[in-house]
Amino acid sequence: MRILIIEDEHQLATAIAAVLQKENYTVDVCHDGETGLAFAITQIHDLIICDLMLPRLDGYAIIRALRSQNIQIPILILTAKTDSDETIIGLDCGADDYLTKPFVMGELLARLRALSRRFGHIVATNLLTFSNLSLNPQTLLVQTPHTHLQLTLKEAQVLELLLKNQTTIVSKELLITKIWGYDSEAEDNHVEVYISFLRKKLLLLNAAVQIQTVRGLGYCLRNTQEGEI
């Protein structure tokens, strides 16, 4: 899961990013509203954490701009305001939840998990499943009924995106953007390397799942048990 933090307090933004990265989230950080909006409209993020009081463009304007373009990424607002009217305005603009500063990091993580469940990014058990294969994106553990393996972070992120899209085709461009980032210098061969790693590990797990290459388009998962009696 990729999370965008838009927060002008550098120390706080760094602290939040460190906690999220420890939980195996991929994180991008922006320190002003204009840059944050530019990142947000790429729609490569699964969640946005947005401060309300930002230089160049405030959080309200960011939320309104996203919702006016029908971009429905879940948004958690951060506010130092104790006036409930400010929070109400943020929610009415289209935010999905809020936290008042100062806050406990554990509560931030809990609210992100709740938003993830609400918007269908991760099921309540934290497991993504397909055929006899399951992945826990937080622990990076992939398993079948009889065995399991620990994946690297990038391997888990690639498999997570494939599992979330099930049998639909996931392009190399989407994999690069979601996992390596919008401004990344990663190329197609980066994806090919990790697809190769995953294929070998699926064989080791005796998974009834194959990663198929759709020439010129990308990759999709196939259940090798379909049609068996």
Image (cartoon, grey):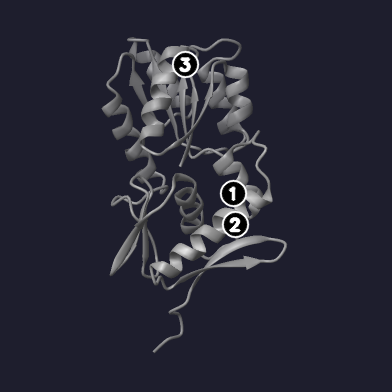
Mark 1: give few (<14), some (14-19) or many (20+) Cα within 10 Å. many
Residues at badges 2 and 3 in contact (C-beta under 8 Å)? no
- Dot 2 or dot 3, earlier in sequence: 3
Residues at badges 2 and 1 in contact (C-beta under 8 Å)? yes
**Which amino acid lies under the numbered mark 1 shown in the image of this protein?**
Leu
Choose top left, top right, bottom left or bottom right for residue 183: top right
- Viewer can see residue 112: yes
| 14 lies above or below 226 | above
Q: Which mark is residue 209?
A: none
In the image, farthest residue toward the bottom: 229
Per the model, the C-alpha gap separating discs 2 and 3 is 34 Å
How far from the left and from the top, in percent, is residue 76? 41, 28
Choose top left, top right, bottom left or bottom right for residue 43: top right
How far from the left and from the top, in percent, is residue 70? 58, 38
Residues at badges 1 and 3 in contact (C-beta under 8 Å)? no
- Dot 1 or dot 3, earlier in sequence: 3
Which residue, given by chain and number where applicable, does mark 1 sit on? 175
Closer mark to the observer between disc 1 and disc 3: 1
Which residue, given by chain and number where applicable, does mark 2 sit on? 170
Instruction: Pick the quarter of the image with the N terminus.
Output: top left
Which of the two residues, 94 or 218, is positioned nearer the viewer here? 218
- The residue under the point 32% across, 32% down is 109
**Which amino acid lies under the numbered mark 2 shown in the image of this protein?**
Val
Choose top left, top right, bottom left or bottom right for residue 14: top left
